[in-house]
Image (spheres, rainbow, N blue to C red):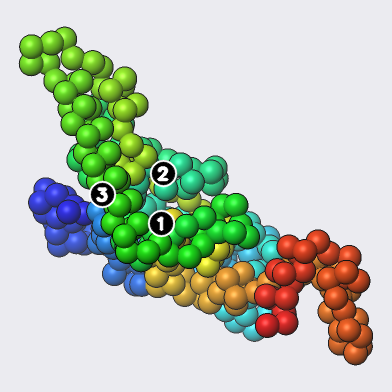
Amino acid sequence: MPLTPEQDAEIADLRATPRTTLRAVSEGAEQHLYVPKPVLDHGFVRMIDYMGDDAAICQAARVSYGRGTKSVQNDEGLIRYLMRHWHSTPFEMCELKLHVKLPVFVARQWIRHRTANVNEYSARYSILDREFYIPRTEDLAAQSSQNNQGRGDVLGPEESARVLDWLREDAHRAYDHYEQMISDEGQQGVARELARMNLPANIYTQWYWKVDLHNLFHFLRLRADSHAQYEIRVYADAICEMVKDWVPAAYRAFEEYRLGGVTLSASGVECLRRMLAGEEVTQETSGMSAREWREFNSQWIT
């Protein structure tokens, strides 16, 4: 289950006792505070705290640029201008703190984004729960033939069943041995910091993750993308729903210029100019590698 009864009670208590404040309040974010959004089979993501709103972005920009922003007619126009021209520091004035429960192998991908503050559940001091991520049948796929770090065709029913059996059996066997190693019944027992190394990468961990909006948008641009691994993409999608309500104008600009936009290389710009002029351009005459040409076509031609 995503949350323990004690955590549910804590959330109910926090939401039942609102506090008055003089700081900026986002009504959209308030709806999400403390409430867990289920992700995968045992995971969740929930908003613990936030700082700032759309107005905070504009406030910071106007301090920085002064008269330079007077031609922008409204706050949303200013935010779109900032996003369009990659002016990142005003977005850093907003911050979000999340509580995330996720499989260890997803956490190892996530931690590559080094621009956040993280505090993770410690298996040196505490005992991890017997909870493992087991994929759905439709999420089991073979290696992609075109991408060394991606998935290809979905596995057939017999192979899927065999793989799922192995995942369950191996995870529970490893956890059985973990429990036996840390037990002190009839033995000294192994230190938790040593016993944890036997646990599989699909066991769940938890952390608090605090990040500013600029770096959060960078995380979401990469991890909410269709090419991202499914198991981290679903967390990014859940966070997108929160951010959309927290800073709606900034999120609309992010969708427009980052999620929905594409970037062209100098070679790509030149090829597009030649195509618009009526020239037939091929991969051989484009100056691009086969993979670059394939990506170019997927973005602009098909």
Give the residue type that dot 1 points to: Glu
Q: CA distance from mark 2 to mark 3?
A: 19 Å
Label 3, secondary structure: give it.
Answer: helix
Give the residue type that dot 2 points to: Phe
Q: CA distance from mark 2 to mark 1?
A: 9 Å
Of labels 2 and 1, earlier in sequence is 2
Label 1, secondary structure: give it.
Answer: helix
Q: Residues within 10 Å of mark 1 (few under 14, many from 20)?
A: some
Q: Nearer the viewer, residue 245 or 59?
A: 245
Q: Nearer the viewer, residue 3 or 79?
A: 3
What percent of the width, then of the height, locates residue 139?
A: 38, 62
Q: Nearer the viewer, mark 3 or mark 1?
A: 3
Q: How many marks are shown on the rendered structure?
A: 3
Indicate whether 299 appears above or below 140: below
Q: Residue at x 8, y 11 (%)?
A: 186
**Which disc number belongs to residue 105?**
2
**Which of the 4 image quadrants contains residue 70?**
bottom right
What percent of the width, then of the height, locates residue 59?
A: 57, 66
- Cβ atoms under marks 2 and 1 closer than 8 Å: yes
Q: Nearer the viewer, residue 80 or 276?
A: 276
**Which disc number belongs to residue 231?**
1
Would you say residue 108 is visible in this rendering?
yes
**Which of the 4 image quadrants contains residue 52?**
bottom left
Give the residue type that dot 3 points to: Asp
Horizontal arrangement in the rendering, residue 142 relative to residue 37 (left or right): right
What percent of the width, then of the height, locates residue 65?
A: 71, 64
Of labels 2 and 3, earlier in sequence is 2
Location of mark 3 (residue): 165
Q: Residue at x 51, y 72 (%)?
A: 251
